[in-house]
Amino acid sequence: LALTGIIYLFKPQLDPLMYGNLLTVQSAEHALSADEQLQRAQAAYPQGKISKYLPPADATSSAQFVMHNDGREVTVFVDPYRGTVLGEQDAKYNLQAIARALHGELMIGTVGDRLVELAA
């Protein structure tokens, strides 16, 4: 629990190291509108259904679209200036999601949750 807690605690520091190519972009003078960014994400994932839009946090951050595609929930990263789809990240199979699942429920659901709470 201590190790997974550390991973979860240092998410803001770990994510840029591990996923910098998805999270960071070169800023430019003009950004595309959210609708234009959405069109680019949908063009790259025509079967995907968008459930959430996360605008860029600052001038050097990518935009993020959470979508359901082929039975998976993925986050699609888009360069807000150029409209380039930078890639995707599976919502269940990345370091933070696995650490959270281990930390919160030992990856065995409600029984794991109860065991973690009992140990705490």
Image (spheres, grey):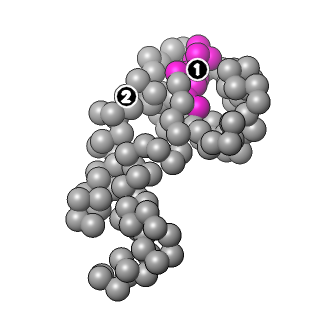
Foreground pick, 71 / 34: 71
Q: Residues within 10 Å of mark 2 (few under 14, many from 20)?
A: few
Q: Is 44 displayed left or right of 16 in the figure?
A: right
Sequence-wise first label, 2 or 1: 2
Asked if residue 78 is among those painted magenta in the image, a careful observer would answer yes
Is residue 5 among the parts visible in the rendering? yes
Q: Quadrant of residue 21?
A: top left
Q: Give residue 107's position: percent from left, percent from top.
A: 43, 63
Q: Element type at marker 2?
A: helix
Q: Is 37 displayed left or right of 59 in the figure?
A: right
Identify the residue under disc 1: 85
Q: Residue furthest left?
A: 2
Is residue 55 among the parts visible in the rendering? no
How many numbered tags mark residues here?
A: 2
- The residue shown at (54%, 14%) is 29
- The residue shown at (30%, 33%) is 17
Identify the residue under disc 2: 20
- The residue shown at (51%, 14%) is 28
What residue range appears in magenta? 76-86
